Amino acid sequence: SQTIHQWPATLVQPVGSPLSLECTVEGTSNPNLYWYRQAAGRGLQLLFYSVGIGQISSEVPQNLSASRPQDRQFILSSKKLLLSDSGFYLCAWSVKLGNTIYFGEGSWLTVV
Amino acid sequence: GENVEQHPSTLSVQEGDSAVIKCTYSDSASNYFPWYKQELGKGPQLIIDIRSNVGEKKDQRIAVTLNKTAKHFSLHITETQPEDSAVYFCAASTSNQFYFGTGTSLTVIP
């Protein structure tokens, strides 16, 4: 069966510091991968998605970036964090676009 | 693009009562409608889904109905229990895009 892992689970970072959140999917090949953010614990905002290695689509302009160095690895990064980057970040995958999306357990980021 | 609206944003019910959450969508090309449950501090988990060629689907205490003509679909939870308390998201999907509703915070009062 397929599983998705993301880490770290919680992170407290000072303003201006870098960020790296990692996500891996097991048990499937060439998945579509996604990064979502939840602010204020409610709505799901799509940040990035990827349909293949090195292919990244950005949905919202911001100081975050995403990379997909391997088929089942997705990384969310920032060079300099802002207070507004605080939130709950969710990695997710699907077999193909429009199909069921499966979420990881999330990473809590607090920028102080 | 697709616009998914979800109501209500918060819902409180007594244990044992039923809960209903409703969503509307705008794109007639949407053909897949999943529902997710998100417990505090966790990622959303798929609980039930329905495709456009089906009008109703049931899984134990939860059911989903779809009205394609009116472009709305609903989640029904019967005999609610405290562990049903969570945030629920609906979604509508076309062949290449996935759109989420804004979520409903359900509280089941023991």
Image (cartoon, grey):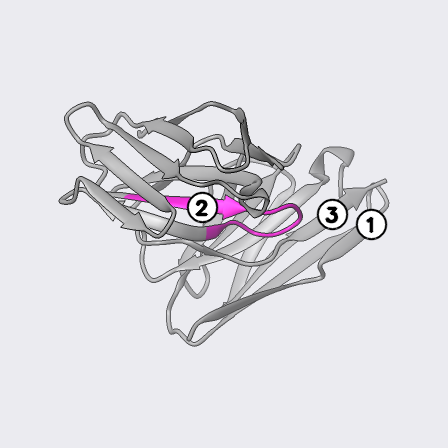
Badge 1 and badge 3 in a common chain? yes
| Left/right of residue A1 with respect to residue A12 in the rendered view | left
Report how far apart the C-alphas of labels 1 and 3 lie in the structure.
6 Å
Identify the disc placed on residue B20. Answer: none
Chain containing the residue with disc 2: B
The segment highlighted magenta reads: B33-45
Which quarter shows the C terminus of chain A? Answer: top right
Residue where numbered disc 2 is placed: B36
Report how far apart the C-alphas of labels 3 and 2 lie in the structure.
22 Å
Residue where numbered disc 1 is placed: A12
Report how far apart the C-alphas of labels 1 and 2 lie in the structure.
28 Å
Residue where numbered disc 3 is placed: A109
Image quadrant assignment for residue B32:
top left
Q: Position of residue B68 (x, y in %)?
A: 17, 31
Graded by Cα atoms within 10 Å as few (under 14), some (14 to 19) or many (20 or more), the crowding at tag 1 reads few
The residue closer to the viewer here, B20 or B47, is B20
